[in-house]
Image (cartoon, helix red, strand yellow):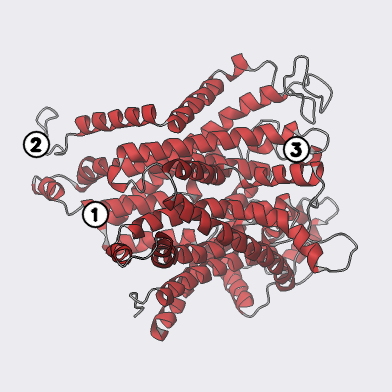
Amino acid sequence: MRSYLVRRLLAIIPTLLAVSVAIFLLLHAAPGGPMAVYANNPNVDPEDLKRLEASLGLHDPYPVQYVKWLGAMLTGNWGISYKYARPVGGILGDRLLATVQLVLASLVIASVVAIPVGVLGATTRPVTQRVIGSLSMLGVSIPTFWLGIVVLLIFSVRLRVLPSGGMATIGADFALTDRLWHLVGPAVVLATLEIAGWSRYLRSMLLEAMRQDYIQTARAKGLSEARVILLHALRNALLPLITLLGLQGGRLVGGAMITETVFSWPGMGRLLVESLAARDYPVLMASFMLMAVLVLAGNLAADLTYAVGDPRIRLD
Amino acid sequence: MAAGLDLAAPPSGVATATQRRGGRLRARLRHDPVAAASAAFLALVAMVAALAPVLSPHDPYGIVDRPLAPPGGSTALGTDDVGRDLVSRLIHASRVSLAVGVGAALLTVSIGTLVGSLAGFYGGRADLALSGLINLMLSIPTLPLALVISAFVEIDLPLLILVIGGVSWTGAARIVRAEVLSLREREFVVGGRALGATDRRLVARYILVNALPPIIVAATLQVATAILAESALSYLGYGIQPPVASWGNMLQNAQRYLRTAPALAVYPGLLISLTVVSINFLGDALRDALDPARRGAPDW
């Protein structure tokens, strides 16, 4: 187990290096380059721009710039945001915290809803199964931002029971109820896609498990159908779902982008959209590296959970 | 080799197999009202897109009334925030969605098939390198990546298709790779090799022909994914640029007028959802008809 962990962690390093090269090249190959914001500003003297570029090391060859940047990233010096004039690390920390709250809330909602829906989808009458199946298909087909807009239209504009966005009531002190009230809309919208996807997946896993011999055995022992399904089949069907959760947990941080934009939730995704508009290079590059780290960490966590949950799997 | 005497022809009766699958699809559509309705709706959207200039009551770029006018008179759904006819813009926007959906799906499947068959057929170092590329792509979230690329170029329709297709081929590549891996050692492929077929011929005429069903299903579902991606990028302002209408960019300003003109927010999203869900239902029906081995549980 430990040697497996070490090997997996070591294998992440070349992937991260490749990601960093790709991101570096992508952003530096972009027209205008890192100084586009200043170059497009008529009040900035071209001489000053030259000096600024030189002082930031932008006249160095690409490999030199890349190595300098990578070194700075590794030592925790992620630069100063052009837009916020604050260290990038601090901004990312704040934004990540907001995103994690949103993602965790949506994961909780998704698990609570998706598991019963998946079980019902596999075990009820065929007609009910079809209805659940069609609803879940609808769930994966509705664009997230539109679902968010509709939720705002109904619950915020018409019924006035939810806020119109943001993380807290402006001017108010922090209160848990206020935070939760702001969290409901975006978390439910973000969870919808997961519910639809997970319940479909869980259902097919459950039907697969129901065909196994040990289910026959459990039935032959005279267990009630509910016990057979909930204690025997579901337990084995849930395992792949745990993997899916790990795989998506990392990805959700990037995927929350649209939900955060619709609901003005100040998280990582919205930061990415804002930084893009402001051509805030230090923030953009650090965000992408952070998202890649989270995705890879999620993958690793998924594999490890799988090994812990399924004693048949041995990791060495 | 003379075209008339093709000794190394693929052994499976491709034509009859295709006919059989076509028959299964028709049978499925007859017995599955949801799939049939989906096919009908998509046909309708395609027809509206093709006949957009004839069908739309107004010029989609022309100002016909005051901004945010309510439905009535010559504007069945009212006007947008500039005063343009909402119906005409919705009709013209269907062209963008379908073009991006189909174009990006074709590109996705082409890249995926190329990468997947190279990796699966040659194995070894080629597989290692291409699988590494796939893993690299998978560790950068797709939508943010597409967003950054679109933000840095003068985005237009063909470029948008390139960007969406260029970031979303990994799924198709993995499907094709797995298919090629499972097919390449089969007797008929070995037989073809013994007859002196070139690698390219083996892949194209022996292996991929038999891997077509999952590829076709993936391509269909990819159309839906691409339409969703286009609408999201356009909503964020980095997709189709105004004044050209797309269902996604029509929603860009709609959030500001939720109170005064909710129709602006409702209809474009409704059309995206209906189109995407229809494609997904049809893709499921296709999977059942073309690819019975892979069919999961029935009736979903």
Across and down, in percent, residue B204 comes to 25, 42
Which quadrant holds the C terminus of chain A? bottom left
Which amino acid, mark 3? Ala
The residue most toward the front is A222
Which class describes the residues within 10 Å of circle 3: few (<14), some (14-19), or many (20+)? many
Q: Looking at this view, is A13 or A229 the one in front?
A: A229
Residue of label 1: B182
Q: Are marks 1 and 2 on the same chain?
A: yes
At mark 3, the secondary structure is: helix
Instruction: Name the disc covering residue B7, or none.
Output: 2
**Looking at the image, is mark 3 or mark 2 nearer the viewer?**
3
Residue at image coords 52%, 21%: B47
Q: Are marks 1 and 2 in contact (CB under 8 Å)?
A: no
Q: CA distance from mark 1 to mark 2?
A: 24 Å
Marks 3/1 same chain:
yes
Question: Mark 1 or 2, which is nearer the eye?
Answer: 1
* Residue highlighted by disc 3: B254
Q: Around disc 1, counting alpha carbons within 10 Å, would you say few (fewer than 14), some (14 to 19), or many (20 or more)?
A: some
For disc 1, the chain is B
Q: Earlier along the polypeptide chain: callout 3 or callout 1?
A: 1
Q: Can see residue B162?
A: no
Q: Is residue B288 left or right of residue B107?
A: left
Q: Chain of mark 2?
A: B
Q: Say if mark 3 contacts mark 2, CB within 8 Å.
A: no
At mark 2, the secondary structure is loop
**Sooner in the amino-acid sequence: mark 3 or mark 2:** 2
- In the rendered structure, which amino acid carries the disc numbered 1? Ser
**Which percent across, then down, holds residue B182?**
24, 54
